[in-house]
Amino acid sequence: MGKILKKIIGCIVFICLFAVVFYKVDKLLEDKRGLSKYNQFYNSDTNFDVIFFGTSHTYHSVFTQELWKNYGITSYNWGYSHCTLAEDYYLLQEVVKYTDPKLVVIDLYGLTEYEEKGNGKYNTEKVELQHPQFDTIPFSSSKYTAIKDIFDDYYDNWDYLFNFALYHNRWGELTEYDFGSGYLKHKDNYQKGSSILFGHASTVYIPNAQYTQVDIDTKCAEYIPRIIEFCKEKDIKLQFVYLPYPAEEYQQNVAHTLEDYFVQYDSCSYRNFLDDGILDEMTDIYDDGSHVNYLGAYKITMELGKYLQETYGLKDYREDPEYASWDKDYEKYVNFKSGRFKRNQVIDNLILGYGGDYRIKLQVNAASDILKKNKVLKSLVKQYGDSLEVEYVENLSANEEDYETIIWIYDAKTDAEVMVTGTKM
């Protein structure tokens, strides 16, 4: 009897040790993008009144931290690259298990773009980009239903149910972000689901002279009434939007067609922001020409926040002591931004410094005509207005070298110097 008991205890110890090792290896090998994006959602000590869904246009255009600072709105950005309405429908069902949103906002870029790709419910050319969202969701019957529906034509769809099945061979891809301090840095960027795109490119947006109706009877469109019905059952207000970016003729037609499409529904709203004049084509576009950079996203966030506040009367929690953690997280978000300023990049730094978190002084060599010949810099100075101190200096120099511009960046709250840099003559 004693030998049998020892064998049983030995088996139990072995199983426990194996489970611990397996868990540690599983966490080490998993793709950390999902952790970085959703960690603050799952570990929040407060509720999120607003949840945003959509593609990368949502992911990079709506800054939830700026909504907190300027409107006191508690929100989380669940948008991600190439995410479709089919995915949004199931992700929403998972989200409400952890928070009680008063409002769901869904951007409709991507409604028709994936119709000719595979089953029309996900981008077959970017299937790996759907993992960060689903990897973070614990296994459940609802997750099983989602995976089997969305990826019904993908022979490896079980990868989405069990992360280890996909990542067990990832040893050669491990980086500093998978270990120790690098892991923690990757884990906590304090953007609450949003993501800043750094860089800029000037572009041209030409509004259609006339708009043509587009067929939006797509696979993804089939999930609109399902989302509407789910939100109605959960007593969640639902707002569909089309966020601004340098949209081509076809996307403009889709955005305007949707204005007529949503007339049939009385339990949700639709707002097309494309032609509201929010963006400056000279300064607000990311260098891929199809997304917005920090400055463009900041402007979109401000307009969207104003619209949502006025339309839905969202509560302002900034004076609520139970939401004090949001102020602390915002300070960490500012620190995150401060670490992204670049040496010898005046324009990119002015783009990132916009919005009131920084006090900025721009010194210009009096012998230079840069504010006349550089249209981007000229536009930025105009947009900053009186909040940017511009000083013309004779013989502008540093370290015995002549400079055309020097930019001084200070934390607006502490007045601590963040960076001093410039461009040489």
Image: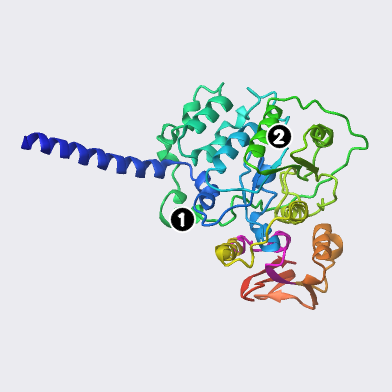
Q: Give me the residue at 85% from left, 66% from top.
A: 369
Quadrant occupied by the C terminus: bottom right
Marks 1/2 in contact by CB < 8 Å: the verdict is: no
**Amino acid marked by disc 1:** Leu
Q: Which residues are magenta?
A: 337-361
Q: Which residue is mark 1?
A: 184
- Image-based side of 367 in relation to 24, left or right: right
Quadrant occupied by the N terminus: top left
**Residue 66's image quarter?**
bottom right
**Amino acid marked by disc 2:** Gly
Q: Give me the residue at 57% from left, 67% from top.
A: 321
The relative height of residue 171 versus residue 364 in the rendered view (above or below) is: above
- Image-based side of 50 in relation to 137, left or right: right
Q: Residue 46 lies in magenta, yes or no?
A: no
| Mark found first going from the N terminus, 1 or 2 | 2
**Residue 319's image quarter?**
bottom right
**In this view of the protein, which residue sits in the foreground, 171 or 28?**
28
**In this view of the protein, which residue sits in the foreground, 13 or 280?**
13
Outermost residue toward the right in this view:
209
Residues at marks 1 and 2, CA–CA distance in whole angstroms: 33 Å
Q: Dot 1 surroundings within 10 Å: few (below 14), some, or many (20 or more)?
A: few
The relative height of residue 304 versus residue 82 in the rendered view (above or below) is: below
Q: Give me the residue at 63% from left, 30% from top.
A: 123
Q: Residue 346 lies in magenta, yes or no?
A: yes
* Rendered location of residue 12, percent (x, y): 21, 39
* Rendered location of residue 335, percent (x, y): 58, 64
Q: Which residue is mark 2?
A: 110
Mark 1 residue element = helix
